[in-house]
Image: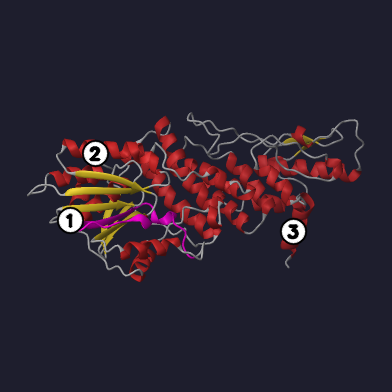
Amino acid sequence: MQASDYNRSAISNAFYCQSMQEFDSFCKPQAQCLNDLSRGTNYLAKSEPYCTLESSSANGSCTTMYYSPSTLSSSQNEPHSPDVSNFRYKLRQLETVMLGDSDFEDDAGNGRSFTGGVVDLPDLEIWKEMMVGFPRRDLKQVLIACAKSVSNNDFSKAQLLISELRQMVSVAGEPIQRLGAYMLEGLVARLSSSGSTIYRSDPPLNTHTLYEICPYFKFGYMSANGAIAEAMKDEKHVHIIDFHIAHGTQWVPLIQAFAKRPGGPPHIRITGFHNSTSELGPVGKRLCKLAKAYNVPFEFHTESGPENFQARPGESLAVNFAFVLHQMPDESVSIRNHRDRVLRLVKSMKPKVVTLVEQESNTNTAPFYPRFLEALDYYNAMFESIDITLPRHHKERINIEQHCLARDVVNIIACEGGERVERHELLGKWKLRFGMAGFSPSPMSPLVNQTIKRLLKNYSERYRLEERDGALYLGWMNRDLVASCAWK
């Protein structure tokens, strides 16, 4: 071991010999009490509110963390041993390095001055070196450094970086600051094992607003609808199974398109799957009302799963997987492998077309650190695209990011095993799964490509559409965000 490594290890042990229980309490955003320094327990930070998924408000306020000399002082009546006094003196110097204070007093009341924040302890230079090991105030690099520390179980360094990040993030700042607030929440939740309590799997009400301001959902729904319309252009009875129908928004334009079909519309039956079928009542009523207005024969049914599927004679089946398959656990989570099991079950139904729309991201089986980097790159592009449409202090934008995107981010970062629901895969992996289930690719119609290109004219020119190997990709600048394809 080199001398510098030995010194770094020694100073870390001297200042941060605290248990995992103590670190857990640091991570939780409740009021904390420092242990008596005379008992040898050392804390470098005090707790306070900060921007989190649950606590940040729509006005974008974010409490800044400060280190206070008073939090490091015990009662004046207590005797101080030389070791304790010396420890306090060193700890105050460490604060000086981190915060840039130029003056402070030691326990004896002696004023000490440091020019340019340079202290007289060689071991503190190691801490200073650690704190400036990444570009100062570069939020992305601080996030990465913190994730690396968490990955390496370097909890002392993680504490310092979490404190630094709390001063840098904001739900009303630049895209990286807003994303950073939620990624910080994910890191804290991971350390305190609270990620599963934050995540909500049900679709939030703000999804409709996200649908309007960004083309991601429209791209996915339009491409899937185009594939279904092409496959069913000559069919008289069409049954569509939607594995995650949500608000039913996807089917409004398809019903309208079928109403204009030469020779008249087909009879359409839609079956929606949901955890609670009672919640789909309003969805069915809206779609029935719309179909009646366009003179389209229509039925709507709800089911809790595909096991109760019953085919009707003369009816052609379409199955829709839009932003849902990634939430089904695969072989890395359960030996039942629901992800592949569902695909095999759907294949046994003999559908004429199956549509897949998924986020083009690799967060399923990746270990924590590379998964963090992937989420940072992916969601940074998404937050930048939202920034073009809505002002940074727009209340609706803050609500969208908090309730539509942030919980996904926290779940990806904070959770493991069965608690991690958001498990995205790249389209290449999905192709392997569909192929093993017995499906073959069904290339998208050129008409679908043209329709989506017209759609994107209403949005920023930084969005791009590409067709590769029979699939469509929607991206922001040089980052693919959503992929869509069809199978038979």
- The residue positioned 33% from the left and 52% from the top of the image is 475
Q: Looking at numbered disc 3 in the image, what kind of residue is underneath it?
A: Ser
| Sequence-earlier tag: 3 or 1 | 3
- Mark 2 sits on what residue? 288
Q: Which residue is mark 3?
A: 9
- Which color scheme did the rendering employ for the protein? secondary structure
Q: Quadrant of the N terminus?
A: bottom right
**Badge 2: how crowded within 10 Å, few (<14), some, or many (20+)?**
some
Rounded to the nearest angstrom, the CA distance separating label 2 from label 3 is 68 Å
**Residue segment shown in magenta:** 307-331
Taking the image as shown, residue 163 lies to the left or right of residue 186, namely: right
Residue 439, compared with residue 399, is above or below; it is below
Q: CA distance from mark 3 to mark 1?
A: 67 Å
Circle nearer the N terminus (2, 3): 3
Type of residue at label 1? Met
Question: Where does label 1 land, which residue?
Answer: 232
Is 319 part of what is drawn in magenta?
Answer: yes
Give the crowd class for mark 1: few <14, some 14-19, many >=20 residues within 10 Å.
many
The mark nearer the N terminus, 1 or 2, is: 1
Looking at the rendered image, the disc whose residue lies closer to the viewer, 1 or 2, is: 2
The secondary structure type at the circle numbered 3 is helix
Say which quarter of the image contains residue 383. top left
The image shows residue 280 at horizontal and vertical percentages of 35, 41
Does the rendering let one see residue 138?
no
On the image, which quarter does residue 13 sit in? Answer: bottom right
